[in-house]
Amino acid sequence: MGFFWADAAPSRPIAPHPLPAQANLEPPPGCPMHKSTTTAPHPPPSQPPPANTPASACPYTPPPSTAETTATPSYISKLKPLNYMPSSIANTREASHQTISLPLERETSTIPRGDGPGTWEYPSPQQMYNAMLRKGYTDTPAEHVESMVAVHNFLNEGAWEEIREWERRFGKGLGRGWEICKHGEEGAARLAALESIRRERSGAATVDDEPKLLRFMGRPNDTTPKARMLGFMAWLYPSEFPDNPPFDRHDWYVQRQQGKEVRYVIDYYSGPPEPTGEPVFYLDVRPAIDGPTAAVERAMRWGGDVWWRASGGSVREEMARRERQGAR
């Protein structure tokens, strides 16, 4: 899945002062511990001490190590802090074994940037292929990269739509969020459609009202607690829960309308393909529980939908709608 090449392995630790290779461990000639038969260990009292201390005198200062003199920036320091991708991914053909030409055009997303004006741009097929080779995925056929970029962009657009729905509910506080969540998922969708129509007619919709993506991070090797719990339930009740772990994970950092930063966790799942052979994907998008507010938001959305369906909310709304139509 997209942005997976941003995952970096930590560099191996290097000893700050490696041991010298020679076996002679005697102190230097100028050290008082050195046994000398030609000179006295201390100068006569009548003679002043030497003005300049020789290079071999105590205290012994080891020469600078090779690791210190030839230190280079680590791989992590070369990554962009906004998306943890390499800063220099060439948009030209680099691999000698690449036999086909890949498009160099980058598609513009609908996701507003949080670090400035405009929206985020997706990598071109050539950039994605170069990044995959850099990460060691040398067995990826170049002719499949265009399809991979299309799926990558489609999934990230879907993830952003899910984040926008969370922000529409809770971006202005928990009180407004409950007013939407208490109508369940079906009722919330109808309220969202009516709100969109009203905003378009009044012209009140502005870019400032939308959330913005500050930065993101691919974490395919870090399983979320929810995914681990679902995996345990699949082991405990295999007939009720499918054994289908997510194939990727992202953490997106979003700026709300009030300027608050919220971290969202996204698990990417694959489902059975369509009869036509097209792949099917599922996204599980929710705010990370970094504090009590995020926990309440998740409980409100889940509990509101459960209560709405259990209490027959859709039936009540239909009956109220018919009563209003009969009174006209």
Image: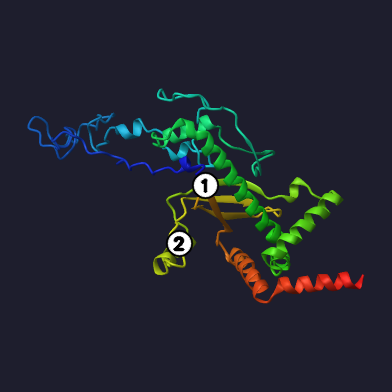
Relative to 126, is 28 on the left or the right? left
Instruction: Tell me where residue 57 appears, x and y as whole percent.
Output: 23, 34
Q: Nearer the viewer, residue 11 or 122?
A: 122
Residue 205 lies, with reference to residue 40, above or below; the image says below
Instruction: Tell me where residue 246 appears, x and y as whole percent.
Output: 47, 54
Instruction: Tell me where residue 206 appears, x and y as whole percent.
Output: 78, 47
Marks counted in the figure total: 2
Residue in the image at 64% along x and 42% along y? 115
- Could you say which disc has been placed on residue 242 in the image? 2
Secondary structure, mark 2, is loop
- Pick out the residue farthest to the bottom: 311
**Few, some or many residues within 10 Å of mark 2 (<14, 14–19, 20+):** few
Asked if the residues shown at circle 2 and circle 1 are in contact, with their CB atoms under 8 angstroms apart, the answer is no
Q: Nearer the viewer, residue 288 or 278?
A: 278
Residue in the image at 48% along x and 31% along y? 143
Residue 190 lies, with reference to residue 113, above or below; the image says below
Q: Earlier in the sequence, mark 2 or mark 1?
A: 2
* Residue 64 shows in the view: no
Type of amino acid at the residue the image marks with label 1? Pro
Type of amino acid at the residue the image marks with label 2? Pro
Q: Which of the 4 quarters of the picture holds residue 35?
A: top left
* Residue 49 shows in the view: yes
Quarter of the C terminus within the rendering = bottom right
Instruction: Tell me where residue 157 appears, x and y as whole percent.
Output: 62, 46
- The residue where tag 1 is placed is 279
**Few, some or many residues within 10 Å of mark 1 (<14, 14–19, 20+):** few
